[in-house]
Amino acid sequence: MVHFSRRLLQMAESETLAMARLSRELKAQGKDIINLSLGEPDFDTPDYIKQAAKDAIDQNYSHYTPVAGYDELLDAICLKLKRDNGLDFKRSQIMVSTGAKQCIANLVMACIDEGDEVIVPAPYWVSYREIIKMAGGKPVEVLAGIDQDFKVSPEQVEKAITSKTKMFMFSSPCNPTGSVYSYEELESIVNVLAKYPDITVVSDEIYELINFVGKHVSIGSFDQISDRTVTINGLSKAFAMTGWRLGYLAAPEPIAKACIKMQGQFTSATCSIAQRAAITALTNGPEKVSNMIAAFKKRNELTHQLLLEIPNIIVNNPQGAFYFFPDISYYIGKSFGNTKIQNSDDLSMYLIHEANVSTVPGSAFGAENYIRLSYATSEDAIVKAVERIKVALLNLK
Ligand code: PMP
Ligand code: GLU
């Protein structure tokens, strides 16, 4: 019999990827599934970035790269962080990796020991919890519901801090809620964190550019905590490059070095061609992708309008990313024939089987009574999908 590690057995499968897999399988069986589960832009990678990758192949960028990434890419990242975020970093503080996901994994594996606590505002992105657990750490979830626009208060953060707290990890714009912390909201949380110098602040800014309220604020730009903030970003979302696997992290030098050491054993480095393409993506600046951001904004407004027409769900007005996270608690406890909906997992399953729409249950993100809908799809698909969800919910008695 094959032996599996406790590490594996205690780990939940990524539910975003699991729901995406299920929709693919049902589609392959001929079902007309609309996929609102996976958080991935439906756009193709822009041509100017693809061209840079083609050139890199022709120029024989085919060898192992430095573990942290090519120097030119580290410079492009420093330039981007200064230009767009007002953050000062040098090469030795940057690590490029196979997506933001592995940046987070390297960081947590490098800095978290058995029993260490990591404060994670909930709803949080699925993988934070499992990566922290994999390192033996304890995710300390601080829940902010839709009544708080899914944003934790400074009081909640302070209450969760103990002598074992090593990290505070969050995303803004947030996956799964689309909420964006304002400057003032971040400042109030910084004022708490400033009192606890041993806490590393991890700011996942992968949705930075998909922000409908104006300029993105990096928590690392606050002086009080800038020397212990790790900023994480990547190309997957704003540049429609999920499959290229390129993310990066900017950190105090000892932390960057530790992450690079970890990566040297796990990965060596990410793909040389993706790195060359990333130099072009980042040196060119965000204006080049403004058409995609405008499309997301339009879809956000459309989805919002349509969701408001569904009776008895509660919807907020997310200001970034490409998700809605409606409160569906009214429908918990209701039934369709013999099927009783006991929780958000049941509701997601009901929707994929009865409405042919895939979603992700709130439980995956540490928040029961919600489901996540990704609107990174065409307007036609959004209209059809929300109508199907509405009909299916109204069938629950
Ligand atoms: N952080 C958040 C909040 C995400 O939604 C995702 C999903 N793509 C990631 C990190 C990981 O992104 P990637 O590994 O594709 O760069
Ligand atoms: N981050 C995306 C999501 O939340 C992609 C899937 C994943 O990496 O978990 O759907």
Image: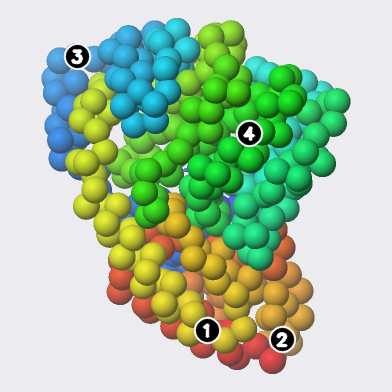
Q: Distance of mark 3 from mark 2, alpha carbons?
A: 60 Å
Say which amino acid is labelled 2. Ser
Cβ–Cβ under 8 Å for marks 2 and 1: no
Q: What is the three-letter code of the residue carrying label 3? A: Asn
Question: Quick one: label 4, few (<14), some, or many (20+) residues within 10 Å?
Answer: many
Q: Position of residue 354 (x, y in %)?
A: 55, 80
Decide if residue 7 is in sight here.
Answer: no
Question: Is 307 on the left or on the right of 18, as rendered?
Answer: left
Q: Residue at x 77, y 21 (%)?
A: 113
From the image, tell me which residue sits under label 4. Answer: 190
Check residue 60 in the rendering and tell me which mark sits there, or answer none: 3
Mark 3 C-beta to ligand 1 under 8 Å: no
Ligand 2 under 8 Å from disc 1 Cβ = no
Give the number of the mark in front: 2 or 1.
Answer: 1
* Residues marked 1 and 3 touching at CB (< 8 Å): no
Q: Secondary structure at mark 1?
A: loop
Q: Which residue is mark 2?
A: 335
In percent of width and height, residue 211 lies at: 39, 50
